[in-house]
């Protein structure tokens, strides 16, 4: 029987930044326009986090019944690890989708934009069919596309819109930026799983690109949005410096992914011994990428907090 800790692990807390970040950043831009709403921020946060957790549990269920998780390099899953019955995991997943639907309905009622029910329903369907159904799009290398759309454009611009009823170019730029970083989180996860995913027939974008190109894709997805924050300078002035922590963490993550640091993430001296020089060239793989996945999520959160502070205080 699964313990409480097993269920917490199944929620994959390290991925929740991808849900919260666009809401935090979007609220900062809404405040900048003079239209911020704490109540709508809370509801949007519930929607985003419930969708993220529901998606994590449904992925656990779908990958588990397909046998994709039978030989994981990461933590064992609820379904694939035999800790909980597939039916129970599926019910919990749909329970979180229900929470997201109720909070979303309340958010739509508050802002009065009932047409938003359609993209909201599409978000739930996208969360389920990532690995669910007979033809999951996550198995076809389209996961990053949907993450960009739903955890970037829709969540970020949608947060701004439900509070301000309009989205400036800064809002769209932010939404695209957090969407790309969320794709980097997924890419880090899928680079780790390339060998087992290929054996299971799960051809993610990372599996299709291959290890070397997938790492380069991660580098671009993680770094370009943070560098792109310079575009906010005319609006927020010197507060653009608030993005430096996100930049520093992103560069550290890239160094680990590309093997430019030692096994503990520390830079090696120039006069390294042959053994240490080999460690310098060793790229993070398997379980070592779990920390990169987590820290990419932290970098996204740092980006979101910098956006919130920069625009809220501008």
Image: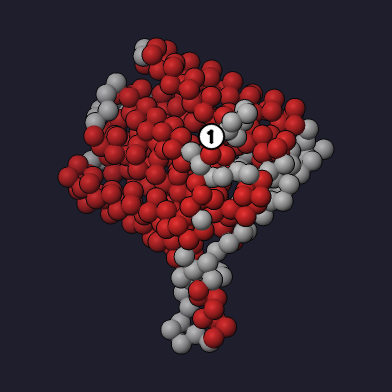
Q: Quadrant of residue 57?
A: top right
Quarter of the image with the C terminus in it: top left
Relative to the observer, which residue lies in front, 149 or 101? 149
| Residue 205 percent coordinates (x, y) | 50, 46
Count the marks. Answer: 1
| Residue 14 percent coordinates (x, y) | 56, 46
Residue 189 in the figure: left or right of residue 181: right
Quarter of the image with the N terminus in it: top right
Residue shown at the point (46%, 34%) measured from the top left: 146
Element type at mark 1: helix
Residue shown at the point (42%, 53%) measured from the top left: 217
Could you tell me if residue 304 is visible in this image?
Answer: no
Way the structure is coloured: secondary structure
| Residue 297 percent coordinates (x, y) | 48, 48
Residue 125 in the figure: left or right of residue 158: right
Could you tell me if residue 177 is visible in this image?
Answer: yes
Q: Residues within 10 Å of mark 1 (few under 14, many from 20)?
A: many
Q: Quadrant of residue 157?
A: top left
| Residue 311 percent coordinates (x, y) | 27, 39
Relative to the observer, which residue lies in front, 207 or 8? 207
Residue 20 in the figure: left or right of residue 203: left
Residue shown at the point (63%, 24%) measured from the top left: 94
- Relative to 71, say whether 4 is above or below: above
Residue shown at the point (29%, 34%) measured from the top left: 171
In the rendered image, the residue lying farthest to the right is 1
- Give the residue at mark 1: 137
């Amino acid at each position: 029987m699964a313990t409480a800790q097993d269920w917490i692990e199944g929620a994959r807390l390290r991925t929740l930044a991808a849900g919260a970040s666009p809401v935090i950043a979007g609220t900062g831009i809404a405040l900048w326009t003079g239209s911020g709403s704490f109540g709508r921020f809370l509801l949007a946060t519930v929607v985003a986090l419930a969708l993220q957790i529901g998606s994590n549990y449904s992925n656990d269920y779908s990958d588990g019944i397909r046998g994709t998780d039978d030989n994981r390099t990461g933590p064992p899953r609820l379904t694939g690890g035999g800790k909980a019955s597939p039916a129970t995991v599926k019910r919990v997943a749909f329970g979180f989708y229900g929470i997201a639907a109720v909070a979303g309905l309340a958010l739509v009622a508050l802002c009065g934009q009932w047409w938003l029910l359609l993209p909201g329903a599409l978000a739930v369907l996208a969360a389920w069919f990532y690995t669910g159904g007979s033809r999951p799009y996550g198995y076809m290398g389209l996961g990053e596309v949907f993450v960009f759309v739903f955890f970037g454009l829709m969540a970020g611009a949608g947060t701004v819109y439900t509070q301000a009823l309009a989205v400036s170019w800064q809002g769209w730029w932010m939404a695209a930026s957090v969407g790309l970083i969320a794709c980097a989180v997924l890419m880090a996860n899928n680079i780790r799983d390339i060998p087992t995913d290929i054996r299971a027939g799960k051809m993610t974008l990372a599996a299709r690109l291959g290890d070397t190109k997938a790492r380069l894709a991660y580098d671009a997805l993680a770094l370009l949005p943070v560098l792109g924050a310079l575009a906010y300078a005319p609006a927020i002035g010197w507060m653009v410096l608030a993005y430096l922590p996100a930049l520093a963490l992103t560069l550290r993550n890239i160094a680990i992914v590309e093997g430019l640091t030692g096994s503990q993430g520390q830079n090696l001296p120039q006069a390294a011994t042959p053994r240490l020089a080999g460690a310098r060239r060793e790229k993070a793989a398997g379980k070592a990428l779990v920390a990169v996945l987590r820290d990419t999520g932290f970098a996204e959160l740092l980006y979101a907090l910098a956006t919130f502070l920069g625009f809220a205080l501008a």
